[in-house]
């Protein structure tokens, strides 16, 4: 997509032209990831976290058909309060022709951020390879899109309802580098660790920024995945997490939930079965990712 097809907020455009720090934020977490009214409060809080670091926030969504990088407050309210579809990259031209709004997924947000010139993106967790994908071929478009979207993406790994090992294998196949942020272990979203050891780690934002510069210097169009674990003090208890997850998969099997309905079913079940704990941790890890993304964006902005 040409930059001319994207509407960029004047504040974001000015920051990009000056080489200032900018961080992209997705809108699906607002529209589908959090309940109302917490979703709007969280969206505003994420932006304020960045402003406190002298970083310009660029929340991304499709507004009345137009991909928009950097939302006005009334546009944030629209995303938070109206029932709108999720929009991946394949949905963008359809929304444009129909003049509809949409909440951008990780894939669409990374795609639009890269095309707008935003180099850093904070999200909660990546999509990935679903359990049972050998039979269903169910794999998130996030992975293939990141192979051609040159951004730094800070996430708390992938949700533990997914196949983490297979997701890491696909990232390797797609030549998407993954680095642990002050960790040697790939995080599992609600949990700070999984069973998977990472090949590489960085000790801070400057090193992450240098690796991204080196990635671009070699001509790669790939994203750089920065795996940033939720702080241990704010993580979910592994024992409680494992019990709830087991119940969620059993419920999905009992109700014969299949295909694209599986993940939404599991996540909603987990929210209810955890008494809201999973949402609480979701907010904590998202705040942590936004903060780290802001630090990396500032490091990249330094000449």
Image: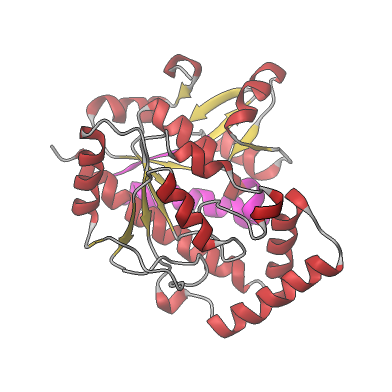
- Seen from the viewer's position, the closer of residues 236 and 18 is 236
Task: Identify whether 246 is placed above or below 267.
Answer: below
x, y (%) of residue 298? 24, 45
Task: Identify whether 187 is placed above or below 88.
Answer: below
x, y (%) of residue 187? 44, 66
Q: In the orientation shown, which residue stands out farthest toward the left?
A: 303
- Seen from the viewer's position, the closer of residues 131 and 87 is 131
Task: Identify whether 196 is placed above or below 153.
Answer: below
Q: Residue at x 69, y 76 (%)?
A: 246
Q: Is residue 255 visible?
A: yes
Q: Residue at x 67, y 24 (%)?
A: 95
Q: Is residue 122 visible?
A: no
On screen, residue 41 versus residue 220, left or right, reads right
- Seen from the viewer's position, the closer of residues 56 and 213 is 213
Task: Identify whether 68 is placed above or below 259.
Answer: above
Stretch in magenta: 31-60
Q: Quadrant of the C terminus?
A: top left
In magenta segment, residue 55: yes
- Seen from the viewer's position, the closer of residues 31 and 36 is 31
x, y (%) of residue 284? 48, 65
Q: In the orientation shown, which residue stands out farthest toward the right?
A: 255
x, y (%) of residue 39? 60, 53
In magenta segment, residue 169: no
Q: Residue at x 66, y 81 (%)?
A: 243
For the image, the number of numbered tags is 0
Q: In the orientation shown, which residue stands out farthest toward the front?
A: 134
Q: Residue at x 27, y 49 (%)?
A: 296
């Amino acid at each position: 997509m040409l930059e001319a097809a994207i509407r960029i907020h004047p504040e974001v455009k000015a920051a990009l032209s000056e080489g200032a720090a900018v961080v992209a934020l997705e809108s699906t977490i607002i529209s589908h990831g959090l309940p109302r009214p917490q979703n709007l409060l969280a969206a505003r809080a994420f932006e304020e976290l960045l402003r406190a670091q002298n970083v310009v926030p660029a929340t991304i969504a499709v507004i009345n058909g137009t991909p928009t990088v950097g939302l006005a407050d009334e546009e944030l309210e629209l995303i938070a309060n109206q029932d709108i579809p999720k929009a991946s990259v394949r949905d963008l031209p359809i929304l444009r022709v129909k003049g509809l709004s949409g909440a951008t997924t990780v894939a669409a947000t990374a795609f639009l951020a890269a095309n707008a010139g935003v180099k850093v993106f904070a999200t909660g967790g990546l999509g990935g390879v679903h359990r049972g994908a050998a039979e269903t071929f169910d794999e998130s478009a996030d992975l293939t899109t990141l192979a051609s979207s040159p951004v730094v993406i800070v996430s708390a790994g992938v949700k533990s309802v997914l196949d983490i090992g297979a997701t890491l294998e696909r990232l390797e196949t797609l030549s998407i580098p993954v680095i642990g942020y002050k960790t040697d272990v790939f995080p599992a979203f609600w949990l700070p660790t999984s069973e998977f050891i990472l090949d590489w780690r960085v000790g801070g934002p400057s090193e992450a920024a240098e690796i991204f510069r080196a990635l671009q210097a070699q001509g790669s169009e790939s994203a750089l995945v920065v795996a940033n674990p939720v702080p241990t003090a704010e993580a979910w208890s592994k024992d409680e997490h494992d019990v709830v997850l087991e119940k969620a998969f059993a419920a999905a099997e009992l109700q014969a939930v299949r295909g694209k309905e599986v993940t939404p079913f599991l996540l909603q079940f987990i929210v209810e079965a955890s008494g809201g704990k999973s949402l609480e941790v979701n907010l904590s890890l998202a705040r942590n990712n936004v903060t780290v993304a802001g630090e990396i964006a500032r490091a990249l902005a330094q000449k």
